[in-house]
Image (spheres, rainbow, N blue to C red):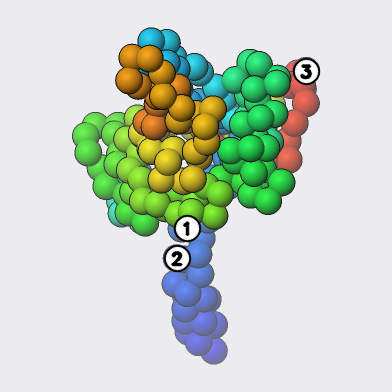
Amino acid sequence: MLNRFTGAVLGAVLTLAPALYAQDNTWAISPLDSFANFSVKHLMISTVHGTAGGMKGTVIYDPKDPSKDVVDATIDVNTLSTGVAKRDDQVKTDYFDAQKFPVIAFKSTKVVKTGSGQLSVTGNLTIKGTTKQVVLAVDGPSQTVRDAQGRSKIGLEATTKISRKDFGIVGTALDGAVETGGIIVSDEVSIELDIELMPPAQAAITGPAKLK
């Protein structure tokens, strides 16, 4: 009887082990502490910088086997900001059509280690209903730390470059020719992601740190 009970318990543990293992490696993106920063050349002589927040999603991170890592994230297009309100309204309305396509989405398809503390994440980026493959160069994730609210956090930075035209971000105000023969806004967009991750169970913990 005892042997059968022990066997049943062991069987249940073995059955649940993969799920528990995945759960231990699952992290939630911290929306208030994660941002997508971007930059484009303007008139080929200066650089315009911007940012977007409202980042949400989950990351499965296995430090021993990056091939098991998975990224599934979205960004709120309506948070896009370049520091000029009138320009931001035009970009969100005329070029991103934020009312119809309110989020930018990324889903990874492959993760490989490229060096110490470095990963290459290949995935599908969707903007305005168009999906293209991109590759993110990732520094991190970092070692685990605890923030003022007692949450466990790890951080990472990722960079890539995309063609805005690939995603239908076009228009006369962007692509009109200038006297030097160039265009008003460059096609190439540089993207830098600053991301903080925390365990999903701690995602609801907010507010000031508790006094001891």
Residue identifier under label 2: 18
In the rendered image, which residue does mark 3 sit on? 211
Q: Is residue 20 left or right of residue 138?
A: right
| Residue closest to the eye, 154 or 169 | 169
Q: Earlier in the sequence, mark 3 or mark 1?
A: 1
The residue type indicated by label 3 comes to Leu
Would you place residue 184 above or below residue 4 in this image?
A: above
Looking at the picture, does residue 41 appear above or below residue 14?
above
Instruction: Name the foreground residue: 201 vs 48.
Output: 48
**Distance of label 3 from label 1 (alpha carbons):** 33 Å
Q: Earlier in the sequence, mark 3 or mark 2?
A: 2
Q: Amino acid at mark 1?
A: Ala
Measured in 3D between alpha carbons, the distance from the residue under mark 2 to the one under mark 1, in whole angstroms, is 6 Å
The residue that label 1 is drawn on is: 22
Contact? badges 2 and 1 (CB < 8 Å): yes
Q: Secondary structure at mark 1?
A: helix
